[in-house]
Each structure stands twice: as structure tokens, then as C-alpha cells.
Image (cartoon, coloured by chain):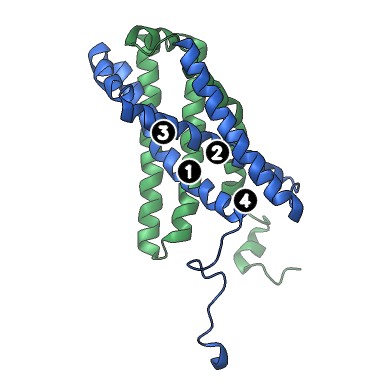
Chain colours: A green, B blue
Amino acid sequence: MNGLRTPLSLVKGLGAAKTGTGHWWMQRVTALALIPLALWFCFSVAALPGSDYATVKAWLGSPFVVTVLILTVIATFYHAQLGLQVVIEDYISGHGMRLAAILLVNFLCMIFATVAIVSLLKISLGA
Amino acid sequence: MSAHKNQPISPHLQVYKLPLTAIMSISHRITGVGLSVGALLLVLTLIAVASGEEAYTAFHSHLSAWYGQIILFLFTFALYFHFCHGVRHLFWDAGAGFNKEDMDKFSKLTLVSAVVLTLLTWFVVLVSG
């Protein structure tokens, strides 16, 4: 039973780290969250009475809209980061290049999500 | 081993006709990458709105131009394709829909659903002005 475990893991006696399926699981969790969020986003934007500045700003002035949009932004970039990482792992075989590409995607997704959230807060709080 | 040296290796993508399921699978991946890039449009729009009316009007003139509308339409379809095929993946994760005879049926259902959702969304755009 213990034949496959490393000496360190035997000493610690903690069992598996339990994060082996974390990437796969969060891809599904964010996908599930994006089902209502994406539908809400598409149809809300489509149903706006116009696309001029006043209309869009008024729509983004609602706390409900901003809250749901922030959730959408977080779920979207989390999901994108996980998905792009799988694509990179499949097609980039060099270790250095692969790590660099994954780090770049990680950083960019965090930056874009943060910029989007700050923009939404600025619009809604009028800072 | 040496006797087989010159034989093509399956699936040999250049001459192999991909089944519908395989085309759907690679399309899911391509639309996923495309949507990640397209998500920047949302970020840029939010930056423009937050920057004020002048910045938004300048940005909006591109979105409402013919090329902007084409990009938005393609973005909508890519989103719904990825959405519908993603739901299919969730069913697969639950262990359902793996029968051979179901494969093409659900591929077609996915495609039809994506087209219907895209047209429905743009119909809402048209009637809301």
C-alpha cells in the first residue's frame, strides 16, 4: 500500500495533496458560473435601448449590474487562464518557453481582470 | 517494425477526414482562444466608458462601424458555440452522451443551438434599437 509513496510523504503522513484535480475542477466551476452570467451579459447588452454613452453609463450605474459584471469578469478571466494554460501545455513542448507562456497568460489575465473591475468601480462610484 | 516504416501513421491529419466530433472539439479550442482575445474588447469598452464620453464615442465609432459589427457578430457566435459545446462537456463529465449514435446527434444539436442563440441575441439587438 505504501510502495508508491515517497519517504517524505510517509514521514509526514498527510496522504495526497488533494490538489491534483484542482485545475480541472475550477475549469468546471467557472464554466458552470458562466452559464447564467454569459446569457445574462449577452441579452442585457443586446436589450439596451441604444449604445450611446449616456445609455451605457446609466446601465453601468446600477449596483446590481456592476456586481454581476464583476462576477462575470472574474469567472471569464479565471476560465480563460485555465483554458489557455491547457492549450499552451499541449502545443509548446520546450520547458522554458512553456513556463514563460503560462506565466505570461497568468499575469495578463490577472491584469485585464483587475483593470476591468477598477473601471467598473470608477464608473459606478464616480471616482 | 522495419517492414512498416513507410506506412502512414494514423490519424495522419492531411488525408484523414475528421469526424464531426473531432471538428467540434478543435473548434471548441479555437473559439476558446478567440474568446480570450475577444474578452479584451470588453475590457477596452469598460476603460473607454470609465475614461469619459469623448473616449467612449471614439471607441464606439469603431464598434458600430461595419467591421466592428462583423467582429461583434462573430464574437457572439464563437461565444455561443463555446457555450453550447461547453455544456456538452459538462454532460460528458457527468458520464452521459458517450454512445456512438449520440455523438453526431449532439454535435448537430450543439451547432443548431449556437446558431439559434446568436440569431436570437441579434434579433433582440435589432428590436431594442
* Residue placed under numbered mark 4 in the picture: A21
Is B53 on the left-hand or right-hand side of A106? Answer: left
Which of label 4 and label 1 is nearer to you? 1
Q: What element carries label 4?
A: loop
For label 2, the SS is helix
Q: Name the residue located 47 percent from the left edge and 41 percent from the top edge.
A: A80
State the separation of the CA atoms marked 3 and 4: 26 Å
Looking at this view, name the residue that lies furthest to the bottom: B2
Residue shown at 54% from the left, 66% from the top: B16
Rendered location of residue B73, percent (x, y)? 43, 30
Pinpoint the chain carrying mark 4.
A
Disc ID at residue B39: 3
Disc 2 with disc 4 on a shared chain: no
Is residue A70 or residue A22 the one in the foreground? A70
Tell me which corner region of the image, top left, top right, bottom left or bottom right, holds residue B9: bottom right
Amino acid at the residue labelled 1: Thr
- The residue that appears at 32% across and 27% down in the rendered structure is B66
CB atoms at circles 2 and 1 under 8 Å apart?
Answer: yes
Circle 4 residues within 10 Å: few <14, some 14–19, many ≥20: few
- Amino acid at dot 4: Thr
Q: Which residue does the numbered mark 1 point to in the structure image? A: B31
Q: Is residue A23 above or below residue A32?
A: below
Say which residue label 2 marks.
B81
